[in-house]
Image: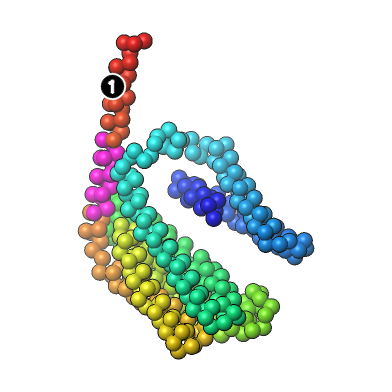
């Protein structure tokens, strides 16, 4: 997991400095090769899970090394070397403060999002071992759908934040609504393809007929929930681009712990409904989250938000300049003191 995080972080860094094409390409290549190697070990060599895990660990090491070597040889990080290696970044308190302020809501949001699924998994375990296995496989399908649509929200987030920082609230608002429009088209296309292939997915994912039957019953509900989930994810990202990650994360947490989880407990532990009831609780929670986030999005004061973003950026730049000036003065002072000793 730590290696995967390092790989993702370095890939995100390359994307930020303008090499997103390489980052995406190397991601596709590394994933394709890793899938092929794992399939070869499992199907033809009969390898154990431990051996597969070691292979994936070595693969992570290798591709991190490839990214670092390529970026160094092509000089992509040359102009960033001083910032990366020549300064102690923790001394830049404004930058650290802003990073922590932005990262903490995102970290807690991801943590509680994962904990929500794990808690729902406990409810599935209470229904039986077959239900627990089916729920784990269903989580994989849901991750695929999430990955297919979250890129649109990420792209809109970057553009919207850029326009707000440039003092163009009207253009930022236009970008945000276009993002939601394109996301709606994309989610319809992805959901249509998903439903069209729904008869094949169960047999691709398992050979157990009981699990196949459960998956077939759940796939239509997953397709329905994907619409609410995608809209909520895109709106969450756009509200975050306004500098309000704490608000969007708080809404997601409230709906998760006061709607999705309690409803899931009622459906499984009290009413003893199968996995369809558990899936229904996720759909209701996602729909509530999307509705609340979209309401916040519609009533946003874009001009006021743009002024806040500009003011915050200006304050951070001023503090950074003051910090650099104080460091330079300290260096000069120390140089003046040591010169007579030479």
Q: Give the residue displayed 56% in from the left and 42% down from the top.
A: 68
Which of 67 and 51 lies nearest the eye of the viewer?
Answer: 51
- The quarter of the picture where residue 233 lies is bottom left
Left/right of residue 134 with respect to residue 320 in the rendered view? right
Q: Position of residue 227 (x, y in %)?
A: 45, 76
SS at circle 1: helix
Which of 1 and 240 lies nearest the eye of the viewer?
Answer: 1
Residue lying farthest right? 44
Q: Give the residue displayed 54% in from the left and 72% down from the top.
A: 139
Which of 100 and 184 lies nearest the eye of the viewer?
Answer: 100
In the image, residue 254 lies in the stretch drawn in magenta: no
Q: Quadrant of the N terminus?
A: bottom right
Q: Give the residue displayed 59% in from the left and 79% down from the top.
A: 129
> Against 73, is 227 above or below?
below
Magenta span: chief secondary structure: helix
Left/right of residue 15 with respect to residue 40 in the rendered view? left
10 Å crowding of disc 1: few (<14), some (14-19), many (20+):
few
> Against 223, is 46 above or below?
above
State whether residue 160 appears in this view: no
State whether residue 164 appears in this view: yes
Which residues lie in the magenta part? 308-322
Q: How many marks?
A: 1
Which of 257 and 288 lies nearest the eye of the viewer?
Answer: 257
Q: Quadrant of the C terminus?
A: top left
Q: Position of residue 94 (x, y in %)?
A: 30, 44
- The quarter of the picture where residue 290 lies is bottom left
Q: Give the residue displayed 48% in from the left and 35% down from the top.
A: 78
Q: Position of residue 246 (x, y in %)?
A: 31, 61
Left/right of residue 184 with respect to residue 248 in the rendered view? right
Q: Which residue is mark 1?
A: 333
Colouring method of the image: rainbow
């Amino acid at each position: 997991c730590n290696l995967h995080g390092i790989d993702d972080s370095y890939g995100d860094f390359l994307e930020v400095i303008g090499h997103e094409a390489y980052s995406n390409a190397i991601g596709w290549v590394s994933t394709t090769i890793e899938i092929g190697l794992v399939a070869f070990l499992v199907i033809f060599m009969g390898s154990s899970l431990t051996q597969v895990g070691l292979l994936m660990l070595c693969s992570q090491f290798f591709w991190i090394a490839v990214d670092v070597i390529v970026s160094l040889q092509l000089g992509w990080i040359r102009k960033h070397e001083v910032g990366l290696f020549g300064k102690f970044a923790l001394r830049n308190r404004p930058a650290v403060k802003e990073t922590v302020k932005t990262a903490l809501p995102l970290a807690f949001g991801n943590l509680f999002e994962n904990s929500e699924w794990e808690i729902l998994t406990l409810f599935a375990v209470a229904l039986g071992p077959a239900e627990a296995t089916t729920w784990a496989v269903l989580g994989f399908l849901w991750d695929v759908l999430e990955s297919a649509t979250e890129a649109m929200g990420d792209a809109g987030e970057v553009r919207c934040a850029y326009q707000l920082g440039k003092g163009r609230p009207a253009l930022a608002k236009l970008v945000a609504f276009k993002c939601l429009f394109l996301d709606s088209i994309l989610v319809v296309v992805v959901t249509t393809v998903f439903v069209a292939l729904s008869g094949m997915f169960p047999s691709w994912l398992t050979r157990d007929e009981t699990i196949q039957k459960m998956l077939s019953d759940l796939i239509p509900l997953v397709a329905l929930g994907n619409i609410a989930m995608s809209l909520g994810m895109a709106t969450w990202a756009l509200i975050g681009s306004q500098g309000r990650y704490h608000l969007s994360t708080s809404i997601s947490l409230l709906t998760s712990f006061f709607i999705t989880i309690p409803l899931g407990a009622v459906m499984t532990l009290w009413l003893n409904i199968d996995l369809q009831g558990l899936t229904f609780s996720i759909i209701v929670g996602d729909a509530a989250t999307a509705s609340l986030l979209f309401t916040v999005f519609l009533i946003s004061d874009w001009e006021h938000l743009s002024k806040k973003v500009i003011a915050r950026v200006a304050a951070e730049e001023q503090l950074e300049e003051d910090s650099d000036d104080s460091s330079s003065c300290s260096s000069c002072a120390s140089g003046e003191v040591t010169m007579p000793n030479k």
